Image (cartoon, coloured by chain):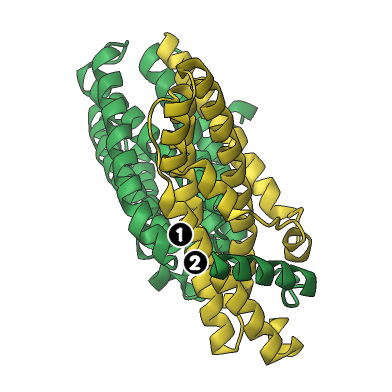
Amino acid sequence: MIITFALVFLALLALLVLIRLAKGRAFPARSGQASLAQVHPVDIQAFRNLTDPAEEEFLRQNLPPAEFKKVQRERLRAAVDYISCAAANAAILVRVGESARRSPVPEVAEAGEKLVDSAIRLRIYAFQALAKLYVAILFPAAQISPAGLAENYERMTRVVFLLGRLRHSTGPASSAS
Amino acid sequence: MSLHVLVSDYLLVAPHLLLVGVLILLVQKGLRRLFPLFFAYTLWELGQFTVALVMLLSPAVTGKQYGIAYSIGLAISTILRFGVIHEIFAHAFGRYHAVSSYGKPAFRWITVGLLALTLSLALYTGGNHFDGVMVLVHLLDRAAAITQCGLLLALFAFASYLGLSLRSHVFGIALGLGVFATVELATAALRSQLGYVGNTTLNYITMATYHVCVVIWLVYLWAPERSTQYAVKGIPEHDLEAWNKELQRLIQQ
């Protein structure tokens, strides 16, 4: 009986989610222009320092265990904030890239395609890295290295730079597509 | 004619009449080639309804015969619905390279997880008030409902998290199927628990949901494909500068 009620409850919850999704699609709240203004710069170096195994090892050797755990947790929480910010940027850039993908200018469309691809990869990496970081917050003695995320973020910023240049070099008519 | 009979007849016939409209739209808009499994599913549902109606009206057909035909029809419908979900996945994620490489294994594991969950649920909650064959039918129905519901929710969650824009037709088909799968999950769970008690009410709920689901398909297939347009007129200058500074800083590292 409990399982039945649990399934019914979950089904109704899922139905509500679907209704909300449909409503959100019918009345989109955000435009791309407004979203673009929400892109915040992310300091990759600071993030690297926070997740640098050498720094972690240095702290481990020079701090008492209890102090190390406390400091490490704070560093990891900060790293979570950095990743969340980078992931939020990536979500916006997916939409920007989608828009660029539809450009009649092949270079812009190609850059848009690359941007979408990089941004999606970053979202996927961010999901994995956040999961790792939350586990590490619970067990600060464990070692983590979300280095792939930093590399991917770098790649994505390069693509955005290229896209921006292409848009400006092809003029406003093509960039409005 | 009582209101009860009127509602029952309406819910039995109306969705299938609307389904003819769905079929016409699929052919008219050339979507038949894009969604062959959804087209096949629509055709099957119409064929199944016609056969069921003939069997119901024919005095020569016994209840057992109808039950067998119903079970076979339900099984094929369920298989086709899985096919439609696969088709939705292909359309939703096929144009994203990154999702293709990461999404496929993820969804394979989600499917395995959902199947393991349904299997353990079937083993844990076996008995109810139905007879032998119908127990199996309802358990399989519930298992399919859980898997389909889980897969569609995973699809929406994945697309939402990654910020992917699903095309209107794909979204509409998925939404209709999702609504049906969620209600089917609730009713299948109740049916496998309650047996024949409240079966009529649950049938009404299922039929009414199916009606809603067909209306969703009809509306989304009828409406012109809306590709999400954002008012991006180039990346603003100050943003470009910020990115430039970020890149310069990265190069100097």
Viewed as shown, does residue B150 lie left or right of B170? left
Q: What label does residue A151 carry, if any? A: 1
Residue drawn 32% across the image and 43% down it = B78
Judge by depth and name the residue closer to the eye, B66 or B243: B243
Task: Assign the N terminus of chain A to one quadrant of the image.
Answer: top left
Residue A112 drawn at (x, y percent): 56, 75
Is residue A98 rendered to the left or right of residue B170? right
State the SS at label 1: helix
On the question of residue B225 being in view, the answer is no
The tint of chain A in the picture is yellow
Q: Quadrant of residue B124?
A: top left
From the viewer's perspective, tell me whether residue B70 is left or right of residue A173: left
**Res B94 → quadrant:** bottom left
State the mark number for residue A35: none
Report the front residue among B25 and B86: B86
The answer to whether the residues at label 1 and label 2 have Cβ atoms under 8 Å apart is yes
Q: Chain of mark 1?
A: A
For the residues labelled 1 and 2, the Cα–Cα distance comes to: 6 Å
Residue B205: percent from the left, percent from the top? 54, 29
Q: Please name whichever residue, B67 or B132, is drawn nearer the observer in this view of the structure.
A: B132
Chain given the colour green: B
Q: Which mark is residue A155?
A: 2
Type of the residue with mark 2? Arg
Q: Amino acid at mark 1?
A: Glu
Few, some or many residues within 10 Å of mark 2 (<14, 14–19, 20+): some
Which residue lies at the image location 67% right of the left edge and 83% below the top edge?
A167
